[in-house]
Image: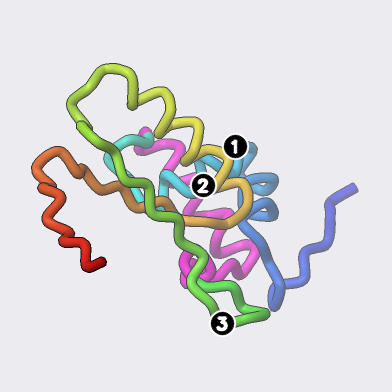
Amino acid sequence: MEQKINHHNATMKDVANAAGVSTATVSRAFTRPDQVSFKTRQKVEQATLKTGYDTYCLTKNTKSSKAKTIFVAIPDITSPIYPDIISGIEQVAAEQGYMVLIGDCKHYKKTATHSY
């Protein structure tokens, strides 16, 4: 039995189910297509059309019209400990419909002055 999808309220999860992939893969296909195989991208694109999913939903919460973005500041993005951490953050965020922005703070110099 085929599941009916409300095209006006299609979610990333609907696209993932229709494409047979995870929500993280759907998010990656939209935001980092170079990290997804051509065949998988095609499945996601076809599922997007089938479900009527609005890719604008990746950055906007349609109920509140607020950006659904998380900013992660990394002290040194070249450190080998961060890729797994960032990957985990991105996966959980994508499942909840959030986009992750990453900033490297390695060259940031604290210049705050204190007034007492």
Say which quadrant the C terminus sits in.
bottom left
Residue at 34%, 53% (x, y): give it. Answer: 101
Real-space Cα separation, disc 2 to disc 3, in angstroms: 21 Å
Q: Nearer the viewer, residue 116 or 31?
A: 116
To which residue does mark 3 refer?
65
Real-space Cα separation, disc 2 to disc 1, in angstroms: 7 Å
User: Label 3 sits on what residue type?
Assistant: Ser
Residue at 13%, 47% (x, y): give it. Answer: 108
Q: Position of residue 20 (x, y in %)?
A: 64, 38
Real-space Cα separation, disc 1 to disc 3, in angstroms: 27 Å
Residue 73 is labelled as none
Q: Nearer the viewer, residue 43 or 64?
A: 64
To which residue does mark 1 refer?
21
User: Label 2 sits on what residue type?
Assistant: Val
Residue 26 is labelled as 2
User: Label 1 sits on what residue type?
Assistant: Val
